[in-house]
């Protein structure tokens, strides 16, 4: 059953004439941030307000280093590797030791504001911060832009796993292809 759902999604994505004809299935907010021109200032402000509110509500510290790493991940809506983040911290004159970066990333992941994209060994700001969900990502293999599909829009029903005697501990779907701006006449 799980195989059928994933196969159906892949078929819809790769067989259709245009990879992004599935645009309506992608979270409108994230689509506007990643695949079309958008008001980045508003997007950035909304995400920062959400994490600040979350940390205040949960009585968590949103330290300057945590803030800066989250800002890096929001800046271009591209996944960043841990060592890229360390380089950016170093350029800002901040502590740039690997354990610190990984602790910050672990915190942001645990709080639901960042995801790790396993296939890229990189991190990306969550398109649905603070909500519990199993992300599905569409990753452009050319420009590395990432769009996060909402669980209910992806067509993957992970709630059926207990029916086949399987306990899901973690689930990520990573779909590789080309975004609309990277599709050239030779690849179309």
Image: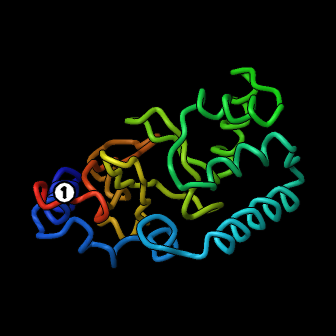
**Is residue 120 shown left or right of residue 184?**
right
Quick check: 180 above or below 136? Answer: below
Counting the numbered discs, the total is: 1
Instruction: From the viewer's side, name the closer residue of 126 and 135.
Output: 126
Q: Residue at x 54, y 55 (%)?
A: 77
Above or below, 93 relative to 135:
above
Kindly indicate the quadrant of the structure image that contains residue 179.
bottom left
Residue 95, how many percent across, how many down?
A: 82, 27
In the picture of the structure, the residue carrying the numbered disc 1 is: 10
Question: Which residue appears at 82% of the width and 65% of the height?
Answer: 53
Element assignment for label 1: helix
Q: Position of residue 166 (x, y in %)?
A: 33, 42
Left or right of 170 in this view: 165: left
Q: Is residue 142 left or right of residue 97?
A: left
Placement of the N terminus among the 4 image quadrants: bottom left
User: Percent position (x, y) of residue 149?
Assistant: 40, 63
Quadrant for the C terminus in the image = bottom left
Q: Is residue 106 left or right of residue 150?
A: right
Tell me where residue 47 appears, x and y as whole percent: 69, 65
């Amino acid at each position: 059953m799980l195989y059928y759902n994933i196969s159906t999604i892949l078929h819809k994505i790769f067989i259709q004439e245009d990879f992004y004809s599935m645009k309506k299935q992608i979270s409108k907010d994230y689509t506007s941030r990643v695949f079309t021109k958008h008001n980045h200032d508003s997007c950035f402000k909304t995400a920062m307000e959400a994490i600040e509110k979350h940390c205040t509500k949960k009585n968590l510290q949103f330290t300057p280093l945590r803030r800066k790493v989250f800002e890096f991940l929001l800046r271009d809506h591209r996944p960043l590797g841990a060592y890229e983040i360390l380089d950016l911290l170093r350029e800002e004159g901040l502590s740039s030791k690997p354990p610190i970066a990984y602790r910050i990333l672990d915190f942001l992941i645990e709080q639901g504001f960042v995801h790790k994209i396993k296939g890229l060994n990189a991190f990306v700001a969550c398109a649905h911060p603070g909500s519990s969900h199993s992300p599905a990502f569409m990753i452009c293999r050319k420009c590395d832009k990432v769009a996060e599909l909402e669980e209910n829009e992806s067509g993957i029903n992970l709630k059926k796993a207990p029916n086949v005697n399987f306990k899901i501990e973690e689930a990520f779907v990573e779909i590789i292809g080309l975004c609309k701006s990277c599709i050239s006449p030779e690849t179309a």
